[in-house]
């Protein structure tokens, strides 16, 4: 069995174990080059940190890896495919809270599960598990807009995980969250990663 696969149209071989792969990834907005030749090779079960200050290009990189926008040049594959073709295998936690504040915790998770085509029996089992893991089960009927910053991030993580993605992209998930909640969030990620989920985190910390 070959140690690496060479996809048609790619100049660089992708290691078989790579869940996120990028070679000479670049993104320009007019004359501004936001991403200047990034190389990545993230394996299954790893937590990979993309660290840098605001304006360093972290969010642009995640938008490309999440299939939200195209790179200007370079090569990128997630789960061995172009990001747009792998979106059902990608969970994406955006920098800003993007769920519905006038829906409850339960309603937000159910809505996202419907968008991600999660079967009803899988949804109920996973929802119960993740709400218990995140210590949100007792607040399932509370509106998202009434949650604290840390609880909102836990809800967003539940929604990102409900479709059982293979890759989880977290764009500055703990910005503006108190230190205790931030520590709890990182502990949750460590546990999830230990189950084989590949996690990429963008953070200024």
Image: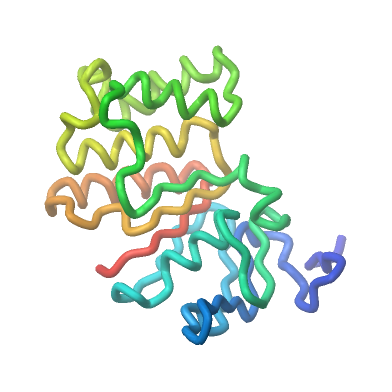
The quadrant holding residue 159 is top left
Image quarter of the N terminus: bottom right
Image quarter of the C terminus: bottom left
Q: Relative to residue 199, is residue 105 drawn left or right?
A: left
Above or below, 73 relative to 102:
below
Q: Position of residue 122 (x, y in %)?
A: 55, 19
The quadrant holding residue 146 is top left
Residue under the image location 53 percent in, 23 percent down: 114
Q: Relative to residue 163, is residue 95 drawn left or right?
A: left
Residue under the image location 56 percent in, 64 percent down: 42
Residue under the image location 30 percent in, 73 percent down: 54
Q: Position of residue 31 (x, y in %)?
A: 51, 86
Residue that lies at the very extreme toward the front in this rendered image: 30
Q: Position of residue 176 (x, y in %)?
A: 18, 55
Above or below, 128 relative to 45:
above
Q: Relative to residue 13, is residue 22 drawn left or right?
A: left
The image shows a total of numbered marks equal to 0
Q: Position of residue 90 (x, y in %)?
A: 56, 46
Color theme of the render = rainbow
The quadrant holding residue 44 is bottom right
Residue that lies at the very extreme toward the bottom in this rendered image: 31
Above or below, 27 relative to 129:
below
Above or below, 94 relative to 51:
above
Q: In front here: 26 or 181?
A: 26
């Amino acid at each position: 069995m070959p140690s690496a696969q060479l996809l048609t149209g790619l100049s660089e071989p992708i290691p078989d174990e790579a869940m996120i792969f990028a070679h000479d990834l670049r993104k320009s907005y007019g004359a501004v080059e936001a991403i200047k030749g990034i190389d990545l090779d993230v394996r299954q079960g790893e937590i990979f940190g993309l660290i840098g200050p605001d304006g360093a290009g972290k969010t642009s990189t995640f938008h490309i890896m999440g299939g939200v926008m195209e790179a200007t040049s370079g090569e990128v594959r997630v789960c061995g495919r172009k990001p747009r073709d792998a979106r059902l295998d990608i969970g994406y936690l955006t920098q800003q809270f993007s769920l519905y504040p006038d829906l409850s915790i339960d309603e937000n998770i159910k809505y996202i599960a419907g968008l991600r085509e999660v079967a009803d029996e899988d949804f109920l089992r996973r929802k119960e598990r993740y709400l218990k893991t995140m210590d949100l089960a007792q607040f399932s009927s509370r509106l998202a807009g009434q949650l604290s910053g840390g609880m909102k991030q836990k809800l967003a993580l539940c929604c990102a995980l409900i479709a059982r993605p293979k890759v989880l992209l977290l764009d500055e998930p703990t910005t503006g969250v108190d230190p205790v909640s931030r520590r709890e969030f990182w502990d949750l990620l460590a546990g999830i990663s230990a189950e084989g989920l590949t996690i990429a985190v963008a953070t200024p910390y």
